Structures are given as structure tokens and as C-alpha cells.
Amino acid sequence: MADLKEARVPDIGGHSDVPVIEVLIKPGDTVEKDQSLITLESDKATMEVPAPFAGVVKELKLKVGDEVSEGALIAIIEASDAAAPAPAKAEAPAAKAPAPTPAPAPAPSPAAAAPQVKEEPAPIGGRGVLPGNAPEGDVAPQARPPLDAKLVMPGDAPYATPAVRAFARELGVDVRQVKGSGRSGRIVREDITAYVKHALASGARPVEGGTVAAGGGLNLLPWPKVDFAKFGEVEEKPLTRIQKISGANLARNWAMIPHVTQHEDADITELEAFRKKLGEENKDLKITPLVFQIKAVVAALKKFPQFNASLDATGEKLILKKYFHVGIAVDTPDGLVVPVIRDCDKKGLLDLATELGEISKKARDKKLGPNDMSGGCFSISSLGGIGGTAFTPIVNAPEVAILGVSKAQTKPVWNGKEFVPRLILPLSLSYDHRVIDGALAARFASFLATQLGDIRRLLL
Ligand code: CAO
């Protein structure tokens, strides 16, 4: 005779109406004892509820979004384990919302002759508390045994608060790889930071889904330790604060974003003539090619919204932005900073030139605040004032693309009849290949070149 039993939500530390954020089983699934059935998430903690016994799921009694309290019915399971724990007292409220109430006599499978349904609390019942609801480092209330991560998060499921999980996701860290140093093995923020530092130092690599692989990643050799003084005179110069911060960001972005760089040439002969004229008319203002590039970028972002986007923290959806804030890489004596010019779509060339002058000055005077450097949608890194023919800029996460600009040079261009001298501006568009396909990048870059090549389009 089939032995149908109820799996119910165990004691969750007196919390009630806790949302179900994941249902990990479906009817027909065979579950092992302690296999996670559902995940609950309070405002501070997530907790997976394990199966109290092994068996086959006959009926699922709740769904994602339901809110549950202790005793809510999760599923009817046909137990395969004769040695399953004895049934417990029924005192259970049902899952709130559309979830069915704990059925007094759940529908048996057709094969089950006169089935008897017993209630079975999950094994953490009666002892576990929802751990994240206690402040970090807090002591479990008296009369409750000390927290045990293995009890509240059985199996290999890591034990971390939603905030810590979100932080880990943001850095692309798979929390299953992280060893918790908190009470009862809880993963705390510092564990994530230490993990990333270690991963970077040991040459870790990105893996599918954007997580950092543990165990040495690419198996790179450790960074060479060399006594340079053995070979000649040396001098030590500590990195600046900006270099340290931007270095860590660049290293993460380079390691975690699959970069591809698309190169393109823009013929800016006409644009340059117009820029010079505009400069003569506005002698008090420095109007460089960069302001036209900002305008062209805005037009391209409008046409290709996928570039005006960021991956969300889970890496599973794109956040498309309806505003056009462009970051400009500025070289300062202390290192690279990227202030943001906001609402570039609403500003004219002269406004952009004024603002570009202001932020460059602010950057070089070390007066930029965090607000000046946040909210960017897309960045431009222009080395055109210095030189070069092309380079591969690093995407400024969480943006998905960046435009590198090199020095414009006069080159012979075939017009169908003859070679004519044209001013050619090299563009290097790096993009996150997880979000942008090569064909789309080629279209974006080509559109940019067309915009820059035809001043009338740019000014439309
Ligand atoms: N081709 C040819 N000439 C160019 C050019 C280009 N693509 N871009 C700028 N120029 C010219 C300008 O017209 C200007 O000429 P004049 O002196 O005759 O007026 C000169 O080069 C210097 O321009 P600039 O660099 O002062 O101004 P900008 O608006 O082009 O750039 C800023 C401003 C802040 C972006 C720039 O000063 C800067 O810091 N660039 C470095 C960015 C950087 O480091 N990127 C690398 C990031 S990855 O490490």
C-alpha cells in the first residue's frame, strides 16, 4: 500500500508569512531525504526546506510567491523509506494566498488504495531559527540549540543572507565555492571579498554565468616574486588610491567579461571642417572631436538599445535604460577616472563642450565625488589627443560596451576614380559578448561611423 505523507514547513523561528521564492520539485520527482524542496526568503535570510523523507512527489501544495508559516503543507510524498520518522502532530496553518490549505484528506494517486496521509515536518522543525533574522554575531535565543548551518541549509547549500548573496552575485561569485567564517559556517561579506581577492591573486577565470571558478581558475602560475634590485638600481613607488581602486575594477571586468573589440574607421573630414568653424565662432570654448563622438554615441544607443543596458545582478536579464548618461575616461596624474555627463541626448554640442571641460578639470583637480562618477550607461575612452591607431578598451561594468577612440589621421581613400585625402578617425568598440553579438556590434560601430561621417545626420 502506498504510504502517502505530508511534508510541511518546519519551525522557522516563529516567523510567519515568509515568501516562497523557489519551488525545487514537481509532481513525479523522486526526492531523497534532506533534498531541498523549496526556498523561503525573509527580508534577511534565505532558507531551503529539506525533504523529511525520501519518496516520490505526488502533489505539490504551494507555489512561488505563496507566503508560508510553520506547518504549511509543501507536498504530498509517497514515502519510499520505511524508516521515515514518525508523524508529528497536525497543527499547521496553510500557506497563505492562492496555495491550497493543508488538505485534511489529500487526493491520493489512483494506485493508492485507501491511503493514509501522515504529517511529516521537515527535519529542522522545532529547532532551527531563520538565521539571518538575528543580527550578525547574535546569539541564538535560549532554549534553542546553537545554530548549525548544516541543519538550516542542509546538503551543500551555502548559508548566507540575501544581502550577502546579492553582493556575491554582483561580483560574480558562486557562493557554493565560498567557505563561511561566520557563526555556524555562515558566509559573511568579508568571506566574499576574501574569496575574490584570492581568486584574482591566483588567476581565477570566469565561468559560465559569470562566476569566478575556484581552485586556481586557469591554473596560472603565482605572480612572480623577483628581487629586481639584484639586477640594477630600483625605486619603489606605491600605487595611488585611484590606481588601486581602478586596477581592482579593471581586473574584475577583464576577468569576468568576455570582451571582443570591433574596429571601424570614420571619415571625419567634413566634421573636422565644421568643428574648426565652430571653434572659431566660440573662441572661449574648447570644442574637441569628443563632443561629436558623444552625440554620435547617443544616436547609436537610441538605435541599438541593447548597448544602453546592464545585466542585472543575477546575470539573467537586461536592464534597458531610457536615459543617456555617457562616461568619459579622464587621464589624471593619479590615474584613470570616469566622470559621467548626464542626459547627453538633451544637450547641444556647446553644452557638451562646456561640461566636458568642467569634468576634465574637476577630475584633474581631484574634486570629483562619487555622484559625478555614477549612473553611466556607456563610456568613451579617447586617446585621440595622444596618438595610436587602435586599442582594446576594457568595458566599464556594469555597462556592456565602451568606445575607444584613437588619433585621426589623413589617409588616401579610393573614391571609385582616384585616391583622395580624407581624415580618418579610428574607433575601437569593446563589448560584453554575453549581451551583444558580433553582428550587432558591427552594426553599431558602422552606424557610429556613418553618423560621424555625415555631420547633417549628427545634428538632426
Ligand atoms: N584625433 C585627433 N586629434 C584629437 C582627437 C582625435 N581623435 N581627439 C582629440 N584631439 C585633439 C583635440 O582636438 C586637441 O587638439 P588642440 O589641442 O589642437 O585643440 C588635442 O587633441 C587634445 O585634446 P584633449 O585630450 O585635451 O581633449 P579631448 O576632448 O579630446 O579629451 C579627455 C578630453 C579628458 C578625454 C582627455 O584629456 C583624456 O584624459 N584622455 C585620456 C583618456 C584615457 O586615458 N583613456 C584611456 C583609458 S584606458 O587606460
Image (cartoon, grey):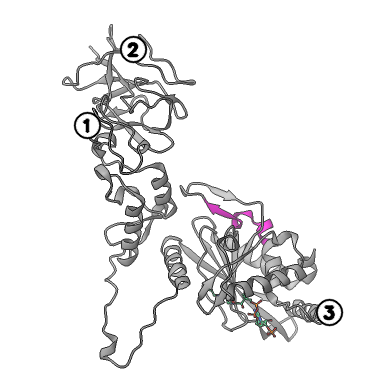
Image quarter for residue 141?
top left
User: Residue 151: horizontal and vertical position, in percent?
Assistant: 24, 34
Label 3 CB sits under 8 Å from any ligand 1 atom: no
Q: Residue furthest right?
A: 281
Sequence-earlier tag: 2 or 3: 2
- Tell me the SS state at disc 1: loop
Q: Amino acid at mark 1?
A: Pro
Q: Amino acid at mark 3?
A: Glu
Q: Is residue 86 left or right of residue 453?
A: left
* Magenta-highlighted residues: 300-311
Image quarter for residue 449?
bottom right
Q: Nearer the viewer, residue 248 or 211?
A: 248
Q: Is residue 303 left or right of residue 435?
A: right
Total of numbered circles in the picture? Answer: 3
Mark 2 and mark 1: Cα distance apart in space: 37 Å
User: Within the magenta stretch, is there residue 304?
Assistant: yes
Q: Nearer the viewer, residue 148 or 401?
A: 148
Reading the image, the residue beneath label 2 is: 108
Ligand 1: which quarter? bottom right
- Tell me the SS state at disc 3: helix
Neighbours of disc 1 within 10 Å: few (<14), some (14-19), many (20+): few
User: Within the magenta stretch, is there residue 354?
Assistant: no
Q: Is residue 400 left or right of residue 213?
A: right
Reading the image, the residue beneath label 1 is: 145
Sequence-earlier tag: 2 or 1: 2
- Tell me the SS state at disc 2: loop
